[in-house]
Amino acid sequence: MADIISGKIIKGIGGFYYIDAEDGHLYECKAKGIFRNKKIKPLVGDNVNIEILDPENNLGNIVEILPRFNSLIRPAVANVDQTIIIFAVSEPEPNFNLLDRFLVSMEKSGVETIICFNKTDLSPDNMEACRSYSKSGYETIFISAREGEGIDRLREIIKDRTTVFAGPSGVGKSSTLNAIKPEAEAQTGAISDKIKRGKHTTRHSELMHIGGRTYIMDTPGFSSLYVDSIEAEDLKEYFPDIAAYTGKCRFNMCNHVSEPDCLVKQAVADGEISRIRYEDYVMIYNDLKEKRKW
Ligand code: GDP
Ligand code: ZN
């Protein structure tokens, strides 16, 4: 009987899966036989049991996929603990509407999100607008990949978790990932050597092992934006800062748009809710209303 050990799929290409196993080795595995009667296909991020077929060459076969607690479609990845969405405070100017739509989609998928504003060294005029996200109900951190500010906090946040990094291009996502990595690079040398780094492309979902149980996935752009499939009347539940007021306004069913005596509008006027967030909420709400007519 071959040895059975557990591990995590960090990459899958053309029917081969690369498993970062508990013994510290990277195994190249197929998923032969066991999935015939099941609809479940192995996903990057899956925790699996593998049978070691050839210990010399680190070859094996996946014999079991352990239960997933969640999965995303784009990027295709299972067991995601959190997403970190990176924007720059400037260069490029943050697109807050895109950020809010992304937050709604992550709220819908049920994956915890942390907002990360990079390039604080540029100290631009719209810093206050970025700071207003600290009131959004999401942990919001400010970093400078260039100067190292906030990188320790970022390391703390990702420690022993599986994190998907998303963000528009140019915001400094690669610089941030590089700033996080050095410390870990030494520990994972064996693993990174096995995967041919030179051939790395972001077209495949791939988890980077940052030591211990810390994994990160770099994803270009954004994962699936689910905003379309939400009813306008439900949108308020996907804004944590606004959801806190559900049922508290004069009208029990208040959508906080044009109703009188609205506590959300009052909170915006008082500066308790970010005006940018609220305006994006109204814009998305109206978009969803419009779509229904079609
Ligand atoms: P990506 O497209 O999001 O991966 O962004 P890059 O990491 O390639 O960075 C895009 C540009 O922003 C590069 O010119 C970086 O040097 C610059 N950049 C990245 N981080 C910072 C930062 O913290 N401050 C400043 N001023 N520039 C940065
Ligand atoms: Zn209201």
Image: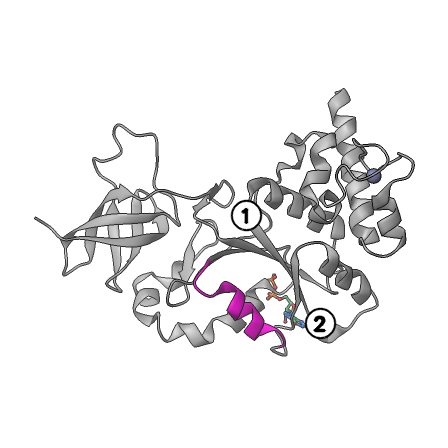
Q: Nearer the viewer, residue 66 or 179?
A: 66
Q: Nearer the viewer, residue 285 or 246?
A: 246
Which region shows up in magenta?
149-161
Under tag 1, what secondary structure? loop
Quadrant where the C terminus is found in the figure: top right
The magenta stretch spans residue 236? no
Task: Compute the Cα span from label 2 to label 1.
Answer: 26 Å
- Judging by the rendered image, the residue that carries numbered circle 2 is 120
Look at 44% across and 76% down and name the residue there.
Answer: 183
Farthest left residue in view: 1
Does the residue at mark 2 contact the one at mark 1 (Cβ under 8 Å)?
no
Image x and y of residue 193, in percent = 32, 67
Circle 1 crowding by C-alpha within 10 Å: few under 14, some 14–19, many from 20? some
Specify whether 62 is left or right of 201: left
Under tag 2, what secondary structure? helix
- Judging by the rendered image, the residue that carries numbered circle 1 is 111
Compared with 235, 164 (above or below) is: below
Quarter for ligand 1?
bottom right
Look at 72% across and 61% down and name the residue there.
Answer: 134
Farthest right residue in view: 260
Q: Nearer the viewer, residue 254 or 10?
A: 254
Q: How many marks?
A: 2
Farthest bottom residue in view: 147
